[in-house]
Amino acid sequence: MNTNTSKRPLEGVRVLDLSRVLAGPWCTQILGDFGADVAKIEMVGVGDDTRRWGPPFLPEDSEGGPGESAYYLGCNRNKRSAAIDIADPAGADLIRRLAAQADILVENFRVGGLKKYQLDYESLRAINPKLVYCSITGFGQDGPYADRGGYDFIAQGMGGLMSITGDRDAAPTKVGVAITDLTTGIYANVSVLIALRHAEKTGIGQHIDCSLLDTQIAMLANQAMSWLVGATVPGRMGNAHPTVVPYRTFESLDGDLIIAVGNDHQFKALVQVLGRPDLALDERFMENSGRVIHRDALEAELEEIVGTWRSHQLIAQLVAAKVPAGPVNTIDQVFADPFIEARKSVHHFVRDDNVDIPTLAYPGKLSETPADYRREPPRLGQHTEEILSQWINLSTDELRHLAAAGVIWNRPGQQSPTS
């Protein structure tokens, strides 16, 4: 853990997190990883939907409270949780007061959903002109689908990703993780940091409109460009690549492996390892464009040869020959790989009740300002009084009154600092 606050580039930045599920929490977790003070606002008695998205769950805590789901734990480290009923006018007023002290607000309510509480961008901008306010929705703040709710699965389908995922003759298939939520969270994070830089320079905040469908369309990348440039409608090709050959999985004697040849030099090295250097001299296969055109003929030859090898032996020889290749790992095999330990891909928190909480590390290795894992994902309402005391100076009496009225809830055993 990095305990030197000078190494946290976002130290002193306050983030009011009104988001839940994945895209928003993914965005704010990254902000927290680099030092921002992230106040995760959750509904009293309910909390983030993903707390109960399981099993698997952590064990019950020492007070007998439910253990958090693995899903929730994956995107909520480096935050503090405050349970506040924003539907109560007194609760909405607390959020406005917190927003006055915030640098960034991230929310993923339906379009217009916060306006009735006077927590929309226009209302909060009047209180805090420097506020960077990021709204994450399924389909954006305007356009033909703005009123619809949206999940990652819907965006994968509507955004074309499922039409190019899966085997050629199989049904459309979604990606095995909520990839559109995750990429939207990353785009939101980048947008927030750009807007924060602008606000620091000018004193003027702004509204950021991020949607899952916008993101998924942008993430079509080269597949979208094939349509825009060449009017080609890409389809499902299983594990093959539309414009690079050979670049797919092959079946060996003991399982599948990946061979990913990105240039003609690598192709020559591949066929040398396979004992078929003549294939590199065949006019059909000498250049990638020809290999794409004559894909079926070439891949039939390669399938026959690769099928005589054991995967680990072939991978070792290909890697030695500088040909990109690798296994198709199951998740347990991923975490048994020495790469995990060498790259510190997993960090372990030990909670105050000695429960071990693993978390996937931020993947970027920054030499001067590395990600900092200082807080395990919070339990619901664990920091309600702490946040309200520190951010807006509520007194002990005020906190007790709000708790008695059901406006806030503080997890038992968690005491607020003395105001």
Image (spheres, helix red, strand yellow):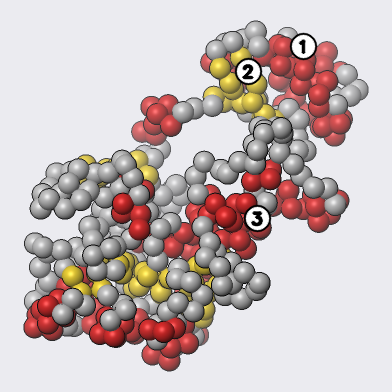
Give the Cα separation between the discs numbered 1 and 3: 42 Å
Position of 418 compared to 88: left or right?
left
Q: What residue is shown at x 85% (from left), y 52% (from top)?
A: 231
Tell me the mark number nearer the camera, choosing from 2 and 1.
2
- Can the viewer see residue 101 in this picture? no
Q: What residue is shown at x 65% (from left), y 55% (from top)?
A: 159
Amino acid type shown at disc 1: Arg
Image quadrant assignment for residue 408? bottom left
Which of the numbered marks, if any, corresponds to residue 251?
2
Q: What residue is shown at x 43% (from left), y 32% (from top)?
A: 331
Amino acid type shown at disc 3: Gly
Tell me the mark number nearer the camera, choosing from 3 and 2.
3
Q: Whole-percent x and y of residue 41?
A: 31, 69
Tell me the mark number nearer the camera, choosing from 1 and 3.
3
Crowd rating for badge 1 (residues with CA inside 10 Å; few <14, some 14–19, many 20+): some
Position of 400 compared to 340: left or right?
left
Q: Is residue 26 above or below residue 359?
A: below
Residue at numbered disc 3: 159
Which of the numbered marks, if any, corresponds to residue 276?
1
